[in-house]
């Protein structure tokens, strides 16, 4: 079953209009966190655990290498690209 076809037990909270205070802020954040946690868990559940772990590990490793590129080359004007 595709992710978009899954039935969610938690509805996405509507974005508030205006300013929230006190308990209203807590309620909005708790509903939003619960919704996004469920979407995240449902998405991850579609993958085999080993494949998912392996793919994320590869993704993070490659992202790290991409970030390090300016620091590994000897071009002074490119070394501060992320600052």
Image (cartoon, grey):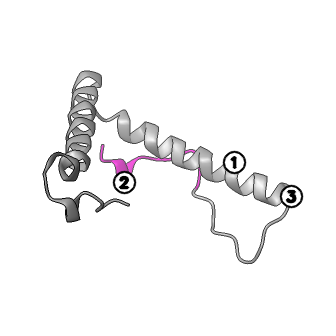
Q: Which residue is mark 1?
A: 30
Is most of the magenta stretch helix, strand or loop? loop
Q: Are marks 1 and 2 in contact (CB under 8 Å)?
A: no
Q: Quadrant of the C terminus?
A: bottom left
Q: Which residue is mark 3?
A: 22
The question of residue 4 being in magenta is answered with yes
Q: For numbered disc 1, what is the local secondary structure?
A: helix
Which residue occupies 61% across, 47% down? Answer: 33
21 sits to left or right of 55? right
Q: Which mark is residue 4?
A: 2
Q: Which mark is residue 69?
A: none
Which residue occupies 75% across, 77% down? Answer: 18
Tag nearer the camera, 1 or 2: 1
Which residue occupies 57% across, 44% down? Answer: 9
x, y percentage for residue 48?
26, 26
Q: For numbered disc 2, what is the local secondary structure?
A: helix
Q: What is the spatial separation of the Cα atoms under label 2 and label 3, in whole angstroms? A: 34 Å
Q: What is the spatial separation of the Cα atoms under label 1 and label 2, in whole angstroms? A: 23 Å
Structural crowding at the residue carrying mark 3, measured as other residues with C-alpha within 10 Å and reported as few (<14), some (14–19) or many (≥20): few
Structural crowding at the residue carrying mark 1, measured as other residues with C-alpha within 10 Å and reported as few (<14), some (14–19) or many (≥20): few
User: Which is nearer the N-term, disc 2 or disc 3?
Assistant: 2
Q: Please determine whether, in this image, residue 37 is positioned above or below residue 12.
A: above
User: Which is nearer the N-term, disc 1 or disc 2?
Assistant: 2
x, y percentage for residue 7?
47, 47
| The magenta segment | 1-11
x, y percentage for residue 10?
59, 48
Q: What is the spatial separation of the Cα atoms under label 3 and label 1, in whole angstroms? A: 13 Å
x, y percentage for residue 36?
52, 48
**Residue ranking furthest to the bottom:** 18
């Amino acid at each position: 079953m595709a992710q978009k076809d899954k039935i969610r037990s938690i509805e996405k909270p509507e974005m508030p209009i205006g300013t929230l205070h006190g308990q209203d802020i807590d309620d909005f954040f708790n509903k939003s966190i619960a919704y996004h946690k469920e979407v995240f868990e449902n998405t991850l559940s579609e993958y085999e655990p080993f494949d998912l772990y392996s793919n994320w590990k590869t993704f993070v490793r490659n992202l790290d290498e991409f970030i390090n590129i300016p620091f590994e080359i000897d071009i002074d004007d490119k070394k501060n690209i992320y600052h």
